[in-house]
Image: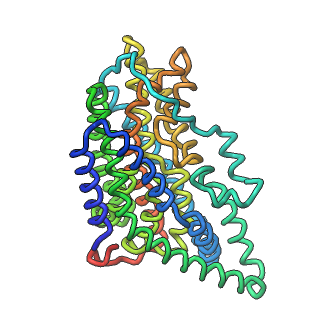
Amino acid sequence: MKIWIKLLVGMLLGAAVAWVTPAEAPALDLFLSKVLGVAFSFARFLVAPLFLVSAIVAVHESREQKLLGRVARGVALVSVAGVVIAGALGVAVAVLAGPGRIPLVSGGSVPGLAPTMHDVVRSMVPSNALGALSPFETGFMPLLAVALAIGLALGFDRAATRPLTTLLDSGSRVLWQVNSFVAEVLPVFVIAVAAARFRELRTILAGGLYTRLILVATVETLFVALVLIPGALWLFGGRKNPYRVLYGLLAPSMAAFVSGELPFAAGTLAKHLKDSLGVRRRAGAAALPLAFALGRAGTAMMVATSFVVVLDSYSQKGFDLDTVLWMLAAVPAVSLLMGAAPALGPVAALASLSAWYGRGFESGYLLAAPAALPLAALAALLDALWTGAAVHIAARSAGEVAERPIRHFA
């Protein structure tokens, strides 16, 4: 059975549990929270070692084939362009559509802050190489730095480094089999994840304060997922049917959506890029961590939309040109910084953006904090799609995609 079908069944079962159970069920919520922790740990199981070992081998092999710079440049350009375009789209749609004001009496808990530029620069040169094994906490730049250093060093003396290269290649293949097993079993845990998330969503929608914001964000998401990303895939992906690629990315985008964070779908995304879309390891294994670090396009769009709502809720004056231009620059900047904190959602970026803006709006992000779950879910869905699309576009441009029939997709 296809993984996306299993995920869909898990999501529907979870939604049914959330629908039939009472809104006030502390025992059930406690149980689901515990299972949720196990599910997220299982989804990340051995993903960091797989990414690190495979990236080292990919750096070595792509350097031998003179592909490293070309693939890295392609992924970086597409990822950053996606963040800029999605941020601008979020600002434009929110200003024109007007998602509505939120009463100032609402609020929420502090979600954390986006990393600073200093944090990002420090993470790129980790003091301890073991930091590369915790990319979901420190970002993927330390992992890339270690992979780049070791991968390039493997080419200095082939006779001396051949045993280590063989060992790393074997380790990558073994870890890949474990990751494939995790991706196949993950839908079982999605039942509990979906039940917990839909119960939270039911509470958020019950008050009606955030219905219009969530509706506008959903429309934006559908436009980007069904029009903008396919357009980019068609334009830069060899003028071929882009919806074939979207179908190959369906399972990881579903996993990201139901969990509300990209790390939950990391292993599934890696599996589908290779097993469904045919991206070869020497192109995809090093490109995927880079796309994770730079490709938070969905986060950029959700941050832009929610920030417009925050400003509109605080002020009756509307938006002048200076404010709009500031948002067009600041939203992509804070979204790129979020690459160093993969587990944080758009409300954390919104908190940093509010602090940057100042003028009495420093705590304005608290207005959107109660809607953190649906915003994070939509952002994660688009982050997964754009990340996968960026890797596929870069790999195809380098000739490192082996087409596979749709019936053989994972």
Looking at the image, residue 7 sits to the left or right of residue 63; the answer is left
Residue at 71% across, 70% down: 150
* Residue 56 image position (x, y, % from top left): 64, 71
Looking at the image, residue 155 sits to the left or right of residue 198; the answer is right
Residue 192's place in the image compared with 303, above or below, is below
Instruction: Please name whichever residue, 11 or 261, is drawn nearer the observer in this view of the structure.
Output: 11
Total count of labels? 0
Considering every residue shown, the one lying at the far top of the view is 316
Residue 198's place in the image compared with 54, above or below, is above
Looking at the image, residue 408 sits to the left or right of residue 162; the answer is left
Instruction: Please name whichever residue, 198 or 124, is drawn nearer the observer in this view of the structure.
Output: 198
Q: Quadrant of residue 390?
A: bottom left
Q: Quadrant of residue 264?
A: bottom left
Residue at 38% across, 70% down: 184
Quadrant where the image shows the N terminus:
bottom left
Quadrant where the image shows the C terminus:
bottom left
* Residue 295 image position (x, y, % from top left): 49, 51
Q: Does residue 71 appear anywhere in the picture?
A: no
* Residue 248 image position (x, y, % from top left): 33, 66
